[in-house]
Image (cartoon, rainbow, N blue to C red):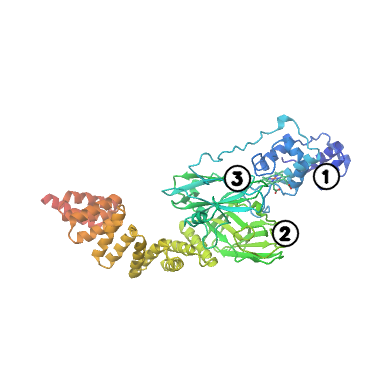
C-alpha cells in the first residue's frame, strides 16, 4: 500500500460525507479523530478505497489461508459479498489485531511467517469499511487464490495413514489424541520434509509428530479400547517421545507446508514409530477424521544437525483462584549455538510467556514474548535470522498462569487446583528450543545436557539414563556412561541395548570380567547377537584364552558373515596355531568385507607366504602398501616373497 496517512484521513472524511450518518458511530469506534468536515473540499480529487483494488489483496493474502471454503476459519472471505457482509466486524478484529491470529508480540524476536497486518493495511481496511465498503471495478480484482486439496509438496515418498477413520463426538471438551504410525521401513531413511494432512479442518486444531523408538506408544494403543489412537497429550512420564532429529514437525491451520532442506534432514530408523498428536475441537455434530502424513526423503545424509533442548519448570501446582502463578526455568549453554526456532507449550490457564537470553557479556536478548497466550493458537516459531548465542549464555523462561474465574479460558467453573499433567484440563509448561551446534561434538554435548535435564526431572525414566549414557559414550566419557547405563539397568534390567552398551563401556575401561558378565547376559536373552560374540572373542583374546576366543568368533561369523573383526581375529588365532590355509580363507573374507584394511592384507599375504604361495603373497603386500606405503612389515616381507619367488 504505502499510502501516506494524510491521504488516508482525507479519504475517510470524503467517505463519511458521501455516506450516511450511521457511519459516524463506526468512525467513533475506529477512534477517528477527523471531525473537521471542511477538509473534504480539498480532497475531492481523492479516490474512494475499493474492495477489488485495495482490500482484496490484503484479505486474500492474510485471511484466505484459513477463511476459504475448506479452511479452518468459520466462514470464507474470498468474495466481495463474503467480506461486505462482515465488513464492520472485519474492521474491528483487524484493528484489535485479534485477526489474523498471532501470539508473539511484535518486536521481541522476528519470526518467519509472522501473521501480522501492517498499520497501513489495518488503516486501509478501516477506511474502506467506513467509506461504505465499495466493491470497485471488476478489472481491479486480483486472482482469487486456490487451495487445492492435494499435497502441497507434491507426491510423498512414503504415505502413512491412520488405518481407519476416527470419530469425534459432537459435543464436549477438546480431544487430544495420539495416533501411532508404524513406518514399515527396513532401512533407515533421511527425511527432508514432512507434510501433515489432518483431513478435517473443521475440527483439527493443531498436530505434531514425535518419534517413539521404544514401541511404548504402540503398546498403549493396543491396550486401549477404541482404536484408532488413544487420548492424551504426549505420553505419561517415564515414556517421553523424541522430536525427530531436533526438528518440530507441526501442523497448524492455515500453515504453508515447509519443503525442508536436505542439509537438515533427519534420520528415520526402521522400527521407530511416528506418533501423531492431534488436538481436536468438537463442532456440534459428530465429525470423522483420518489424518495422513507424507514423508519426503533425501538420498544425501544431512550436514547440519539441530538439537532440541527444553526449558521445563517442574512441578506445576496452581491453587484455585490464583491469578499470578509463575513458573521459571533456565539453563546455561555449554557450547556456541544458533537458535533456529522456539516452541512454547502450556494449556488454557497460561496467560503470559516470556523467554530471554542473557549473554556472557550481560546483554539481554528477548527470544519470545507472548503477552496474551491463547492455547487455541499454539504454534512453533522460526526466527527470520538464526539467533547467535555464545557458550555460557543463560536461556530462561517465565510463564504466568491465571487460575481465577476471571480467566475466560479457565476450563473449570468454579476454578479448582490444577496440577501438571497431559490432559488439557491439567497444565504444562515448557519451551522447546531448536539449536544448531557448530560441530557434531558440540551437538553431542547439547544432547547429553538434554537427557541430563530429563533425568533431573524424572529420575525414574530409564530411557533418559540410557540416552545420556549414549551421548557421554560417544564423547569418550566412559566413566560417566558407565554410571548412566548402570542406572538405566537398575530401572529396567530387560533393556538389552543398555546392557550391550554397558559391556562395551566396561571393555573400554578394561573391566574385562564385568564386560564378560554383561555380554553373557546379553547372549542369555539374544543368543545370536553377533557383536556380543565378537566382542567376547576380543576379551578372551586379551585374556590369552584363544580357544574360548575362537569359539565366540566362530559364533559371531555364523550369525553375521559380514563382520570384519571376527574373520580377521580368528584368522590370527588359527595362523598362530599353524592352520595357515584356514587362516588364509578367513583373511581373504576379511579383505573382501573391508578392502582398505592394510593389516588384513598383510595378514593374508603372510598366510600365503607361509604356505609358499609367493605370487599371491606379493599381490596382497602390494595391496597393503597401496593403502599404507609406509607399512614396514609389508615392505620387508614383500622383498622376502620376491626373493623366494626367484629362487623357487
Ligand atoms: C490461521 C487461520 C486464520 C487466519 C489467517 C485468519 N483467521 Fe479469522 N478466524 C479463524 C478462526 C479459526 C476463527 C474462529 C475462531 C475465533 O473466532 O477465534 C476466525 C474468526 C474470525 C472472525 C469472527 C470473529 C468473531 O469474533 O466471531 C472474523 C471476523 C475473522 N476471523 C476475520 C479474519 C480476517 C479479516 C483475517 C485476515 C486479516 C483473518 N480472519 C485471518 C482463523 C483465521
Q: According to the image, label 1 marks what residue?
A: 27
Decide which of tag 1 and tag 2 comes sooner along the chain: 1
Q: Is residue 105 above or below residue 88?
A: below
Q: Is residue 477 left or right of residue 602?
A: right
How far across and down, in percent of the image, does residue 160 sit?
A: 50, 45
Decide which of tag 3 and tag 2 comes sooner along the chain: 3
Q: CA distance from mark 1 to mark 2?
A: 31 Å
* Numbered mark located on residue 331 in the image: none
Q: Is residue 86 above or below residue 398?
A: above
* Numbered mark located on residue 288 in the image: 3
Q: How many marks?
A: 3
- Quadrant observed for ligand 1 in the rendered image: top right
Quadrant for residue 199, please give it. Answer: top right
Q: Is residue 520 left or right of residue 458?
A: left
Label 1 close to label 3 by CB (< 8 Å): no
Residue plotted at (87% across, 44% down): 35
Q: According to the image, label 2 marks what residue?
A: 407
Amino acid at each position: 500500500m504505502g499510502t501516506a496517512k494524510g491521504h488516508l484521513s482525507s479519504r475517510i472524511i470524503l467517505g463519511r460525507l458521501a455516506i450516511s450518518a450511521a457511519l459516524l458511530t463506526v468512525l467513533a469506534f475506529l477512534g477517528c479523530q477527523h471531525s473537521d468536515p471542511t477538509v473534504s473540499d480539498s480532497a475531492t480529487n481523492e479516490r474512494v478505497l475499493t474492495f477489488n483494488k485495495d482490500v482484496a489483496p490484503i484479505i486474500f493474502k492474510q485471511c484466505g489461508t484459513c477463511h476459504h471454503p475448506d479452511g479452518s476459519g468459520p466462514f470464507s472471505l474470498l468474495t466481495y459479498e463474503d467480506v461486505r457482509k462482515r465488513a464492520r466486524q472485519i474492521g474491528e478484529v483487524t484493528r484489535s489485531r485479534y485477526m489474523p491470529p498471532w501470539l508473539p508480540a511484535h518486536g521481541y524476536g522476528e519470526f518467519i511467517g509472522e501473521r501480522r497486518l501492517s498499520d497501513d493495511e489495518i488503516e486501509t481496511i478501516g477506511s474502506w469499511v467506513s467509506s461504505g465498503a465499495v466493491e470497485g471495478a471488476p478489472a481491479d480484482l486480483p486472482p482469487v487464490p486456490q487451495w487445492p486439496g492435494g499435497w502441497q509438496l507434491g507426491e510423498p515418498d512414503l504415505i502413512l495413514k491412520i488405518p481407519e477413520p476416527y470419530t469425534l463426538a459432537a459435543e464436549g471438551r477438546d480431544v487430544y489424541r495420539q495416533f501411532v504410525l508404524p513406518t514399515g521401513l527396513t532401512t533407515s531413511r533421511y527425511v527432508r520434509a514432512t507434510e501433515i494432512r489432518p483431513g478435517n479442518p473443521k475440527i483439527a486444531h493443531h498436530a505434531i509428530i514425535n518419534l517413539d523408538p521404544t514401541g511404548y506408544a504402540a503398546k498403549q494403543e493396543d491396550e486401549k479400547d477404541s482404536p484408532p489412537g488413544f487420548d492424551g497429550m504426549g505420553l505419561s512420564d517415564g515414556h517421553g517421545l523424541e522430536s525427530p532429529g531436533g526438528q518440530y514437525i507441526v501442523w497448524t491451520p492455515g500453515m504453508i507446508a515447509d519443503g525442508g532442506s536436505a542439509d537438515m534432514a533427519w534420520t528415520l530408523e526402521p522400527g521407530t514409530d511416528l506418533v501423531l498428536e492431534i488436538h481436536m475441537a468438537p463442532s456440534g455434530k459428530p465429525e470423522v477424521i483420518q489424518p495422513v502424513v507424507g514423508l519426503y526423503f533425501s538420498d544425501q545424509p544431512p550436514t547440519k544437525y539441530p538439537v532440541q533442548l527444553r526449558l521445563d519448570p517442574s512441578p506445576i501446582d496452581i491453587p484455585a483462584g490464583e491469578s499470578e502463578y509463575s513458573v521459571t526455568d533456565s539453563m546455561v549453554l555449554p557450547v556456541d549455538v544458533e537458535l533456529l526456532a522456539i516452541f512454547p507449550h502450556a494449556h488454557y490457564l497460561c496467560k503470559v510467556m516470556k523467554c530471554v537470553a542473557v549473554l556472557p557479556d550481560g546483554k539481554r536478548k528477548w527470544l519470545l514474548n507472548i503477552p496474551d497466550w491463547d492455547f487455541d493458537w499454539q504454534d512453533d516459531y522460526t526466527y527470520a535470522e538464526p539467533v547467535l548465542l555464545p557458550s555460557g549464555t543463560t536461556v530462561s523462561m517465565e510463564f504466568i498462569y491465571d487460575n481465577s474465574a476471571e480467566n475466560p479460558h479457565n476450563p473449570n467453573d468454579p476454578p479448582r487446583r490444577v496440577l501438571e499433567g497431559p490432559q488439557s484440563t491439567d497444565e504444562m509448561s515448557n519451551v522447546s528450543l531448536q539449536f544448531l551446534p557448530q560441530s557434531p561434538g558440540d551437538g553431542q554435548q547439547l544432547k547429553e545436557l538434554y537427557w541430563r535435564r530429563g533425568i533431573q526431572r524424572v529420575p525414574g525414566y530409564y530411557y533418559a539414563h540410557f540416552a545420556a549414557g549414549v551421548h557421554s559414550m560417544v564423547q569418550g566419557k566412559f566413566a560417566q556412561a558407565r554410571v548412566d547405563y548402570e542406572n538405566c539397568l537398575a530401572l529396567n534390567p530387560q533393556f538389552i541395548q543398555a546392557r550391550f552398551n554397558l559391556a562395551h563401556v566396561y571393555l573400554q575401561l578394561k573391566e574385562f570380567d564385568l564386560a564378560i558378565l554383561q555380554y553373557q547376559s546379553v547372549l542369555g536373552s539374544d543368543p545370536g547377537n553377533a557383536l556380543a560374540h565378537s566382542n567376547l572373542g576380543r576379551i578372551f583374546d586379551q585374556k590369552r584364552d584363544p580357544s574360548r576366543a575362537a569359539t565366540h568368533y566362530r559364533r559371531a561369523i555364523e550369525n553375521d558373515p559380514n563382520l570384519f573383526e571376527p574373520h580377521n581375529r580368528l584368522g590370527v588365532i588359527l595362523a598362530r596355531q599353524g592352520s595357515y590355509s584356514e587362516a588364509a580363507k578367513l583373511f581373504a573374507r576379511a579383505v573382501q568385507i573391508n578392502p582398505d584394511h592394510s593389516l588384513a592384507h598383510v595378514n593374508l599375504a603372510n598366510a600365503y607366504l607361509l604356505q609358499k604361495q609367493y605370487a599371491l603373497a606379493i599381490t596382497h603386500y602390494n595391496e597393503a602398501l597401496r593403502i599404507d606405503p609406509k607399512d614396514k612389515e609389508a615392505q620387508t616381507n614383500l622383498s622376502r616373497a620376491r626373493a623366494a619367488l626367484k629362487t623357487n
